[in-house]
Amino acid sequence: MFGGDFVKGILKRAAGTEQKLDLIYVKKDNQLSQRTIKVLAVTDYSVKAYCYTKRQFRTFKLDNILSVVPFRNRRTA
């Protein structure tokens, strides 16, 4: 995965904080999904997080995360 260590570093720094992140993720059916999460824990293979998009706790495979950036509020004027 391109930039895997960089993505993992961002996720690890956010773990245990109140920082929200936006991520682009490949779902099991190979569809892209955008999620807003709060990272709870990071392992060698996965991220445990609260997903604000689905309003549930979720586990994401690190290999399926394509992009992660700090959350930006997308309010429209």
Image: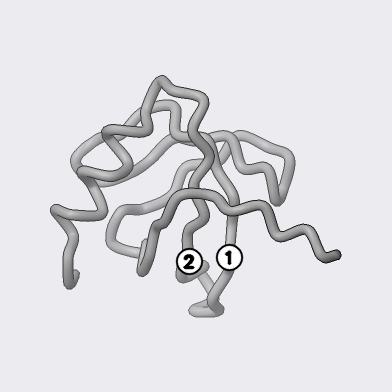
Q: How far apart are marks 2 and 1 (CA)?
A: 5 Å
Residues marked 2 and 1 touching at CB (< 8 Å) = yes
Residue at image point 58% right, 65% down: 34
Mark 1: amino acid: Gln
| Colouring style | one colour
Mark 2: amino acid: Ile
User: SS at mark 1?
Assistant: strand
Q: Where is residue 5 in the image (x, y as percent from the top left)?
A: 14, 53
Q: Is residue 59 above or below residue 18?
A: below
Packing grade of label 1 (10 A; few <14, some 14-19, many >=20) is some
Q: Where is residue 41 in the image (x, y as percent from the top left)?
A: 36, 28
Specify whether 70 is left or right of 9. Answer: right
Q: Is residue 6 above or below residue 77?
A: above
First in sequence, mark 2 or 1: give its number. Answer: 2
Residue at image point 49% right, 33% down: 19
Which one is in front, 69 or 67? 69
Q: Name the residue under label 2.
A: 24
Q: Quadrant of the image for the C terminus?
A: bottom right
Q: Name the residue under label 1.
A: 34
User: SS at mark 2?
Assistant: strand
Specify whether 33 is left or right of 40. Answer: right
